[in-house]
Image (tube, rainbow, N blue to C red):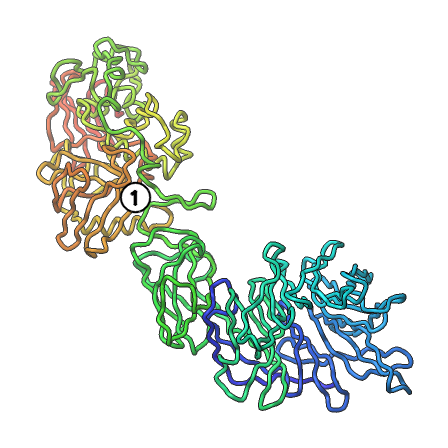
């Protein structure tokens, strides 16, 4: 037994200009591999890249071989039948398991004029003879080990086609009274070959599910050589190569270089790429033919016939090297993408590495898909041999969890047409993620983008919606009985008259007292007097409500907070407001008392202690405690914070608050959900917002100019441009907590109704002091208290 090892020839650059459905015939560089240094002919290549064929041995004659794992191995000869000697063996077909079938040529001992053939099957270790009749030939084997061939069974005078399934030999019908040959089988067990008709002509056929179909001929004769898993068939008819795809189109001739030349198609892969003979080795695709020899750069190699092709694009050919017949393999140099890897997370405005392996003789086009390969955006091209790119991800990209990088080789001598997919061989990376400057979340493996049209309320920030008289008229505080104290509300509160910082409570006071109690909790607003046993109001809560209640002037803060909570924490939001049943799409929820309550519930959160200091800015006084930050936060600061917010993992969302530059008391709260750099002005950015004054409008935005350090409201222009009064809130998760009541004085004396007391608060010491007219004193700084006022206690 002799083993032959491959001898790699120098690489041969083969460039194809063929449509993109091919797995092979695009811009491909092939390595031309000599399967042997001896006279050899290849016949079959499997999906695993195994090659079967025959090789000439000077002593033993023709020997069958299998080439796998870069090594050519001679297949062991089977035991010859009694009275016969083996004169040659040829491998005709192989599958992905490395199993091989073919024919063994026999010569009668003591009778040199008598010959016959038997089939053989090689399982990777042993070779056995298979006989289905006289002159058995085995031509092909599929990946489930079904074998096809032809033989002359007992009682027949001509060849009959058969297949072997689990050692059972099944003969199938003929088209006419004479011989049939079965040459190929696909993985669906469809069989093709040719059969002799009664007039002596022979026609290609397809045998499938116990029935045989005549495929016809151009004039008289035809033969089918190969069938793929789409049941597309190729072969030859009257010296013209053909393809047959269905009964409607029938047999279609393949392009010939010249009418005087013969052509034959030997194989077709599942991408529809056809190989064969058209004067020399030829490849057909999309009705075009390409001579492989015109693409070989060395004159001492001539490719005679292309005999088979697999779905990886590997092609086996019979070739001539300096006049010697050789078995050759055209092996595509594959592109393999090393980075990005599956589930990598990239961020816009940051550099990430794209790395791949491939031919060092090619240039490469790098493209990005955000939709799992349905469409691509060009990124860059490389110089010859460059297989790595550090790419700063464009800040114009939206978030996607179905991203792919595609690397395509192309001929450096050809201009790149970005709208064409020809001239390229491509490889797609594993799926990864890109986080853009937008507000997104992942629900059930689906990426969802916040938009004003879907995730904002459908109704606007108007009095008739948010504070209609039909609602507030129920609160007549002169007669209102507090449900917690069970006493008239007016006993402790100035209803309809001025008191306490010149404020009074009316029916239309916003928000209503029950909603205030719901928002800030009973524990913060009431206490139980251990002396009297009565439930009473905490003075801080009473003054807090009195200070902030007023005529309705807008619910923008509540709109913004509620929409973000419903987006980011839908389960918590739904539990708090069960009637809001579809927080995933607020736009579908109608306006009613419950949805109004959900919005207004969060409006007063802005007055809570934790929200009053959220910008760490100087406060003019406690009326302006909700983040007057104009002197400290610039639009550039906000731009940087927006970028950081959108790229955060896990998700962070915040409100955007802006004011009149000339009137910092007049504010508006919106939801920023996307940041987009303007191409025509790279220092200008659009901040797309859900603006409750314009519900369901995805077109509202604020423009930030990073050069001028200026912001400007667009598409509405209620606010003048400026460089102050523009800031972000605390993260929305803070609004899941109950806000804390707070008061802030600079040693101010507050007029009190509680028993002629004087109340002092020293913010520097965090100390509360209460004096009565008798000069008695109560002091509490939250860590200790002292008192000589009878009946006093800390609350």
Task: Specify whether 366 is left or right of 480.
Answer: right
Residue 221 drawn at (x, y percent) = 69, 68
The quarter holding residue 525 reads top left
Residue 306 drawn at (x, y percent) = 60, 75
Q: Residue at x 26, y 41 (%)?
A: 699
Task: Specify whether 132 is left or right of 437.
Answer: right
Residue at the top extreme? 479
The quarter holding residue 752 reads top left
Residue 168 drawn at (x, y percent) = 82, 61
Q: Residue at x 54, y 89 (%)?
A: 300
How crowded is the residue under tag 1: few (<14 C-alpha within 10 Å), some, or many (20+)?
A: many
Which is nearer the eye, 13 or 176? 176
Residue of label 1: 673
Task: Specify whether 131 is left or right of 616.
Answer: right
Give the number of callouts.
Answer: 1
Q: Is residue 441 visible?
A: yes
Which is nearer the eye, 132 or 68? 132
If the image is split into quadrants, where does the C terminus sit? top left
Residue 117 drawn at (x, y percent) = 82, 76
Q: Is residue 523 visible?
A: no
**Compared with residue 313, is residue 280 higher up or lower down, i.e. above or below?**
below
Q: Residue at x 50, y 82 (%)?
A: 296
If the image is split into quadrants, where does the N terminus sit? bottom right
Secondary structure under the numbered disc 1 in the rendered image: strand
């Amino acid at each position: 037994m002799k083993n032959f090892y491959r001898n790699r020839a120098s690489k041969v650059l083969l460039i194809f200009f063929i449509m993109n459905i091919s797995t092979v015939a695009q811009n491909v560089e092939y390595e031309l591999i000599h399967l042997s240094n001896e006279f050899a002919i290849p016949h079959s290549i499997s999906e695993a890249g195994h090659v079967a064929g025959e090789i000439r041995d000077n002593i033993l004659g023709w020997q069958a071989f299998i080439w796998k794992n870069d090594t050519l191995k001679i297949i062991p000869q089977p035991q010859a039948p009694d009275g016969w000697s083996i004169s040659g063996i040829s491998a005709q077909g192989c599958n992905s398991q490395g199993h091989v079938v073919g024919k063994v040529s026999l010569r009668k001992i003591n009778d040199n004029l008598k010959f016959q053939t038997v089939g053989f099957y090689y399982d990777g270790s042993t070779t056995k003879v298979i006989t289905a009749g006289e002159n058995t030939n085995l031509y092909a084997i599929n990946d489930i080990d079904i074998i096809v061939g032809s033989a002359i069974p007992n009682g027949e005078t001509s060849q009959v086609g058969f297949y072997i399934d689990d050692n059972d030999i099944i003969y199938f019908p003929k088209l006419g009274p004479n011989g049939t040959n079965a040459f190929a089988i696909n993985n669906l067990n469809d069989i093709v070959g040719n059969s002799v008709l009664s007039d002596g002509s022979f026609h290609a056929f397809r045998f499938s599910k116990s029935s045989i179909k005549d495929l016809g001929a151009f004039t008289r004769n035809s033969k089918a050589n190969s069938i793929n898993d789409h049941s597309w068939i190729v072969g030859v008819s009257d010296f013209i190569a053909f393809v047959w795809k269905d009964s409607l189109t029938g047999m279609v001739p393949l392009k010939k270089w010249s009418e005087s030349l013969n052509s034959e198609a030997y194989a077709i892969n599942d991408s529809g790429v056809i190989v064969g003979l058209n004067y020399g080795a030829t490849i057909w695709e999309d009705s075009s033919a390409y001579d492989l020899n015109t693409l070989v750069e060395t004159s001492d190699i001539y490719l005679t016939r292309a005999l088979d092709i697999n779905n990886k694009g590997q092609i086996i050919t019979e070739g001539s090297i300096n006049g010697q017949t050789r078995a050759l393999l055209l092996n595509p140099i594959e592109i393999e993408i090393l980075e990005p890897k599956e589930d990598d997370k990239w961020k816009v405005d940051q550099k990430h590495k794209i790395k791949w392996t491939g031919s060092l003789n090619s240039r490469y086009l790098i493209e990005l898909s955000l939709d799992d390969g349905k469409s691509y955006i060009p990124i860059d091209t490389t110089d010859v041999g460059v297989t790595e790119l550090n790419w700063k991800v464009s800040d114009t990209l939206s978030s996607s969890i179905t991203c792919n990088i595609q690397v395509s080789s192309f001929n450096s001598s050809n201009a790149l047409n970005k709208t064409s997919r020809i001239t390229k061989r491509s490889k797609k990376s594993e799926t990864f993620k890109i986080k853009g400057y937008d507000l997104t979340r992942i629900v059930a493996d689906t990426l969802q983008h916040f938009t004003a049209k879907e995730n904002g309320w459908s109704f606007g920030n108007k009095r008739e919606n948010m504070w209609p008289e039909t609602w507030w008229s129920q609160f007549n505080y002169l007669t209102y009985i507090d449900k917690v104290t069970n006493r008239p509300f007016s006993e402790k509160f100035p209803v309809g008259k001025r008191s306490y910082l010149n404020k009074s409570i009316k029916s239309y006071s916003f928000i209503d007292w029950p909603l205030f109690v719901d928002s800030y909790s009973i524990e913060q607003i009431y206490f139980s007097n251990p002396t009297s046993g009565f439930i009473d109001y905490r003075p801080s809560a009473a003054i807090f409500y009195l200070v902030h209640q007023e005529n309705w002037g807008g619910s923008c803060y509540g709109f913004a907070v509620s929409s973000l909570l419903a987006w980011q924490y839908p389960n918590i939001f739904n539990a708090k407001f069960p009637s809001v049943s579809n927080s995933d799409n607020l736009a579908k929820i109608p306006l009613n008392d419950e949805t109004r309550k959900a919005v207004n519930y969060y409006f007063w959160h802005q007055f809570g202690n934790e929200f009053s200091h959220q910008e760490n800015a100087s406060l003019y006084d406690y009326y302006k405690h909700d983040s007057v930050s104009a002197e400290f936060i610039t639009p550039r600061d906000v731009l940087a914070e927006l970028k950081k917010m959108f790229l955060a993992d896990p998700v962070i969302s915040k409100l955007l608050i802006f004011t009149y530059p000339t009137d910092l008391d007049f504010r508006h709260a919106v939801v920023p959900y996307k940041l987009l750099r303007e191409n025509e002005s790279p220092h200008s950015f659009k901040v797309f917002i859900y603006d409750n004054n314009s519900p369901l409008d995805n077109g509202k935005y604020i423009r930030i100019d990073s050069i001028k350090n200026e912001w400007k409201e667009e598409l509405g222009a209620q606010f003048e441009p400026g460089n102050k009064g523009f800031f972000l809130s605390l993260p929305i998760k803070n609004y899941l907590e109950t806000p804390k009541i707070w008061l802030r004085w600079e040693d101010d004396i507050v007029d009190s109704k509680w028993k002629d007391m004087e109340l002092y608060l020293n913010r520097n010491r965090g100390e509360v002091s209460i004096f009565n007219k008798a000069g008695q004193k109560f002091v509490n700084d939250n860590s200790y208290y002292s008192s000589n006022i009878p009946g006093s206690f800390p609350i």
